[in-house]
Amino acid sequence: MRLKAATLRNYRMHEELRVEFDPARTVVGGPNESGKSTLVEAIHRALFFRHRSAVDLESIRPRRLTAAPEVVVEFSRRGHEYELHKVFKGPQGSVAKLTDRTTGEQFTGDEADDRLRDLLGVDDVHPSKFRGQWSHLWVWQGMATADPTSADVASDSAKKLRLKLAGGPGRGLGESEHDSATYATIVATHGETYGAKGVVLKSSDLAAARADVDTARQAAADAAATLRDLEQAADAILREEATLAGCSDTLDEAARAIARTDAVLARIEGVERQLEHEKRELKAADDAYATLAQGDAEIRSLDQAIAAVRTSLAPQETDLATLAGHEKRSQEAETQAAAALAQAAAEERTAMTEQDFFETIGRAFGLAARRAQLEKTLGQIAAREAEIARLDSQLRELPTINEKQADELADLERRLGVAKATLDAIATRIEVRSAAETISLGEERLEAGEEKTLTDAADLTIGRGTTIRVTPGGGQTLADVRRTIAEIDGSLASKLTALGVASAAAARETFEHRTTADSLRKQLLATVEELGGEELKAELAQTLSAIEAADAEIARKLPTGRARPADAAAIATAREQVARRHADAAKAFQDAQDGFDAARRAAADATKRRQEAEAAMTASREDLQRLGIRKLALESHHGGDREGRLCERADAKKKAGETVAGLEQSLASLNPTQARADRERLARTVELTEKKAAEARERQATARGRLQQAGSTDLHTAKASADARLELAERRLAEIDRRGRAIDLLRKLFDDRRQAVAEQLAAPLRDKVAEYLDALCGGGSRVEVSLTNDGLAGLKVSRPTADGGSFDFGSLSGGTKEQVAAACRLAMAELLADGDTCLPIVFDDAFTNSDPERIQGVQRVLDLGARRGLQIIVLSCNPQDYGLLGAKAIDLTPGSPTPTGPTPA
Amino acid sequence: MSIPLYLPAVITFIHTADWQLGKPFSRVADEESRARLRQERLDAVRRIGDLARERRAAFVVVAGDLFDSNRPTNRTVSEACDAIASIGVPVHVIPGNHDHAGPGSIWEQDFFLAESRERAPNLKVHLTTNPVDESGCILLPCPLHRRQAASDPCGWIREFDFASLDGRPRILIAHGSTVDFKGEQDEEDLAVQPNFIQLEHLPTSELDYIALGDWHGFAKAGDKAWYAGSHETDRFPKAGQTTGHVAVVRVGRGAAPEVEPVRTGRSRWLVHEETFSGDAGPATLHDLLNQLTQEPGRQWVLLKLSLAGSLGLAAHAELEARLRSWQAALLDLRLDRNVAIEPSDAEIEALVDCPDDPLIGHVARELVARREAGGDDGPIAATALAMLHQLAGGDA
């Protein structure tokens, strides 16, 4: 179908408007409110609204006129030219007339509407849906960015498109109603077992069968366990019975063996008792023989000992006599040595006395010499002590001044001098150079050449009538100086008075004098100390006393008739002689002493040896006596005829030994060790077997208890039932599972196929859209869109430059949306055009979001559509945007020439 | 041993065994059916009572396995006592391998002792090998004391001093297998086969009848030796086996016993195998089963049905439907189903080659390919194909 021209009368703002469309490309321009949209709306109304429809009727009436809106649409389709004339007056008075100019056929009223519907290929719809007719071809203002595959935009067209894509004759794709119905049944049946995501529904037979199997399996396991428990208890009773029987047999056998072993043991004990007795006999015989043999041997040995002692006694006596003689001689020599010693001692004592006497005299001489020396020194000391006393007296008379005090006084005097010098400096000096008249200073008369220094104000009187008050300068300082001088002067005077000196110089002198005297005194004291001082006096006293004592001693020791030697030298010589004599006497005494000691030791030694010999001999005699007594005792104890009796006892001993050996052999043949081990082993066997039996009885009782507890439940039956139920449940599950898997497989195969078909069917549309997109923005565009039961869905676009990702239509920008939507619409229109090869497609202000660069692309897209046989009608308030489309331009601007415009060739 | 004044020459008694009362029939899926089967075993005991009265039997011998286990429930014990009491004549019982007299067995349970004393005074349980006088006969019981006795339970009879017995007929009662009967064991097996009765070593001339239990079919086991079999069938019998009978025995000292099998069981245990080769198979099978179960009626029949071969999709669906019907009607249907789903060429073509329904066609082709590829997924694909066939309405 191709629109050729449209004429509007009394349609909203258009009183009379005729527009002729280019068969391929038309751009209708005009500002807002110039009636562009009204033009296409009127054409749409004429084509798709029933002529008597009152829908939106009020809105299309002209504003000023009462005349009814009227539209004439001229179009061609499949080689026929048609004219459609409609007057909209609502249910009453509306007109519809369709004229086939090619054939001359004419249809009016509802027939015209019906015929038109067939020509346009649209279904009869509710009046409210009229506006939605051909919505994919009619881009209403403001709908440019809507998803062209959405149900709102393309429900009707998309269905048609889907049918067209799927149901093309001979293509063998898509599905029939029967297919769909079967699929629905399969989905429903599948849904009885499986939920979303293929999960088995809890309410399904399959889930129930699985649960049954689980329950039955558990029940079978429980029943088996219970039964096993019971059977084990029954088995245990039988087993323990066998154990008990075995124990009983063992005990019987053991009892018999014990009886046998006990008999053997009784015999063994008899032999052992006898053997014990015989062994005692044997020991007695042994002992008797041994006792006699021992006594005999002892007596023999005593005899030998006595003989030996006797033999040794004679030489002992000879030795003793020799030793006694030696002792006597030694004693005599000792006596002689003692006498010599006494004599030497007396001589030594005499020499010593003499030496002592001379020593005392020598000492008296020494003492006298010392006394003289001491007395001289003491005289020197006394002279120095007198000097010290003189100095002490001198110091006592001098004022006591130390260095500090002297310094202080000197300082005060210096400060006083300074103060006075200051005063002097301040003072005014008056010098009388010449005196023609009497000059007096105060009361004092001054002569020529006299000088005066004034430190205080004074009146200088010259002559009679002239008095000059002279005041020295300085002011306050003068007073301060004066006060200082007074203070220092006062302080100096008081200190001088206190120290008892006239001046600081005197004080310094006094101090120095004291220092000198003190120093001298200390030197004297040191000299006295050095000479010995008091110690010497004491020594002198002692010396005097010693001299006295020595004199007394000398007097006492002086032999009668002899004078006290007075010559010191003679005394010394005498002392040496006496000392030599004493030393000789002492040596002689020592020698005598040594000789005596040796003699005494020799005597003692001889005595000792003699005593030892005597003791040895006494001991031998005692031994002899003791041995004799012992021998007598033994002989009396063992009696006579010892040899005969020894033979008898040896015989008895041999016989007893033979008896014991016989018995021991008998005992060995009875093997008592083995018999006792057997007895022990058997006793142990009995004990263990009884214990084992007791345990078996206990276990049996426990097992019986378990059987009793099992009650009257038929466990065999229960187990068999549980097993069978499990088998049944498993069989049932297998069957249900098989059917479940089968329906699942069916569902999957149907779903897969439908998906594949849907993908396949949408391919032509995808390719077409991609072609238009390539025209818009270069090659490589890819589009996803799939067919659904109701139409199309899932429009996605990807461009090679856009990171390779694909984008949902909804996520695109406004400009891209309207361009992609336009591409889609063009593709859909092209596919739907089919044999007719043409469909008009109207874009009413459809690219308002596109930038100028993109508008270039849009023009290429629109041109491609036109070249492929579509009739492109663009409405825009900026018709210059489409200047390069090469389209017929129609200007609806008020006042412009009749909007026919130039038609391109 | 006192000698009765009157000794009838021939005595009639009923030999039965393997009642296995309380048997759970666990392999029967339906709980109601299991209950009916258990009840039927009790009712069959009552029918033995009817037979005893009819044949004037002096007593009944139960050669082991009166109960299914040696610890039946109190309810089973109680019902058993009532049923036994209804027989009216003495009922002599030995423990078999199922209800052996091992430790803690039913035979020493207080409840059983009290219940049997109170409710079934005619019940005589023999736990020892002591000879028993009964109505002019000597019963020689060989009770089992364990599930699997290693030694011949009748071994003691070889040492028995028959000279102590008088001229009354001697009936040995035992439970176990016999070499003659099975005929399959070699010498090595004999040593390990439990509860094995060596018939050839029994002093047969000293005995007049050997009443055996353990084998569930009626059968002669040897000279004077019979298995009575279970009184009510309790398993699918082997070919040629007579089950659900008791033996009415006429015995006299020194004479060959007269043994007559009499049916006491009601349930029928059928085994049928069918190999399908054409899609008419399910209908044919249905007709055949109708015929087979006419007597005693579907509700008393347990059917072990082994199905093999292959069926097309429609026939398979038909088979499923028919089996559901039989499952509901029979006492039990034990299916061994190995029927392959082999869609016919036409069925495959109908599913695969349907230009009008391209989706179904595509999926069907995929399933056919998977089925033909075999492996684990093969049967699943076949089932899915059958389901598709069914869900698509079979007319795709």
Image (cartoon, coloured by chain):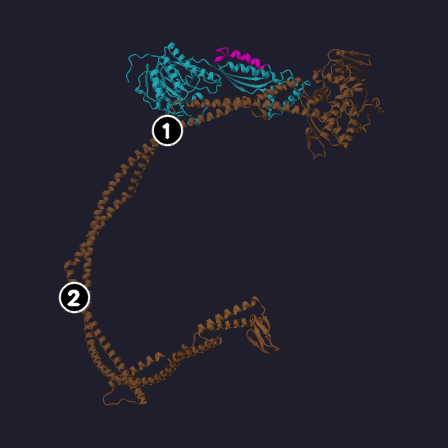
Provide the secondary structure element on which disc 2 rests.
helix
The colour of chain A is brown
Q: Are marks 1 and 2 in contact (CB under 8 Å)?
A: no
Which of the pair A783/A54 is nearer the observer? A54
Which image quadrant for residue A637? bottom left
Who's the residue at 51% across and 69% down the image? A486
Rounded to the nearest angstrom, the CA distance separating label 1 from label 2 is 98 Å
Task: Indicate which disc, 1 or 2, sits on the residue closer to the N terminus.
Answer: 2
Name the residue tied to disc 1: A703
Who's the residue at 25% across and 78% down the image? A597
Could you tell me the amino acid type at mark 2?
Answer: Gln
Whether A417 is among the magenta residues is no
Which of the pair A240/A560 is nearer the observer? A560
Quarter occupied by the C terminus of chain A = top right
Which SS type dominates the magenta stretch? helix
Q: Residues within 10 Å of mark 2 (few under 14, many from 20)?
A: few
Residue B211, visible in the rendered structure: no
Name the residue tied to disc 2: A625
For this orientation, the residue located farthest to the front is: A465
Could you tell me the amino acid type at mark 1?
Answer: Ala
Give above or below for A10 relative to A388.
above
Residue B177, visible in the rendered structure: yes
> Which x, y percent locates residue A625?
16, 66
The segment highlighted magenta reads B280-300
Who's the residue at 80% across and 12% down the image? A105
The colour of chain B is cyan
> Which x, y percent locates residue A115?
76, 13
